[in-house]
Image (spheres, grey):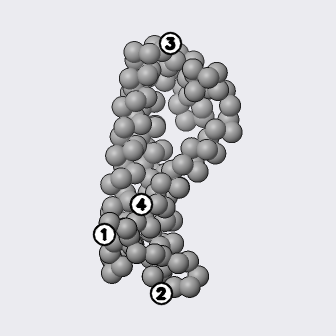
Amino acid sequence: MKLFSLENNGYLRFLNVFIVFYFTNRLAKKNRQIDDDDNFLTAFGSLIVSNMVTVALTVVSFVIYAKFIQPDFINHFDGGIFWNNHVTLDQAAFILFFEGTGSALAVSFINVMYWNERTPDNKCVPVEPAKE
């Protein structure tokens, strides 16, 4: 975003939410197409693992960015109401991991609950068989 001077555009957060929901939904739908009798915990575990891998890669990318690409980024980081104004890189990475974990749980749960009731013979939301 910095390359395109869009780092101050708050509307891009909605795009991020859309992207996370979209790809988690695609994975849940694909899992449902492959195994129609997939139980709740298997489907939920699959979505959690994929979203937690994304969170881990995001935290690693954040640390690389804040440490090597723009080292003064953490000096301009506002701590908010829970932290003081002198947030360390470790604290910021922990906050990002904690927030990402909560989001991964919420998005995975919403999608697995949606697809839990959907079957290929459900006329409300058609699920076509997976293509090999």
How far apart are the two marked residues, 4 and 2, measured between alpha carbons? 20 Å
The local secondary structure at tag 1 comes to helix
**Contact between labelled residues 2 and 1, with CB atoms less than 8 Å apart:** no
Q: Is residue 70 something that shows in the picture?
A: yes
The local secondary structure at tag 3 comes to helix
Q: Amino acid at mark 1?
A: Thr
* The disc label shown at residue 27, or none: 4
Q: Dot 1: few (<14), some (14–19), or many (≥20) neighbours within 10 Å?
A: few
**Residue at mark 1:** 42
Q: Which residue corresponds to the image point at 50% horizontal and 19% vertical from the top-left?
A: 74
**Contact between labelled residues 3 and 4, with CB atoms less than 8 Å apart:** no
Q: Which residue corresponds to the image point at 38% horizontal and 23% vertical from the top-left?
A: 64
Q: Amino acid at mark 2?
A: Asp
**Residue at mark 2:** 121
> Which quadrant of the view contains residue 85?
top right
Going from N to C along the chain, the mark reached first, 4 or 2, is 4
Q: Nearer the viewer, mark 4 or mark 3?
A: 4
In the rendered image, the quadrant that contains the C terminus is bottom left
> Which quadrant of the view contains residue 68?
top left
Q: Amino acid at mark 4?
A: Leu
Q: Amino acid at mark 3?
A: Asp
**Residue at mark 3:** 72
Q: Which residue corresponds to the image point at 43% horizontal and 22% vertical from the top-left?
A: 65
> Which quadrant of the view contains residue 5?
top right
How far apart are the two marked residues, 1 and 4, measured between alpha carbons? 13 Å
Going from N to C along the chain, the mark reached first, 4 or 3, is 4
Q: Dot 4: few (<14), some (14–19), or many (≥20) neighbours within 10 Å?
A: some
Q: Nearer the viewer, residue 75 or 67?
A: 67
Residue at the limit of the structure toward the top, as seen here: 72
The local secondary structure at tag 4 comes to helix
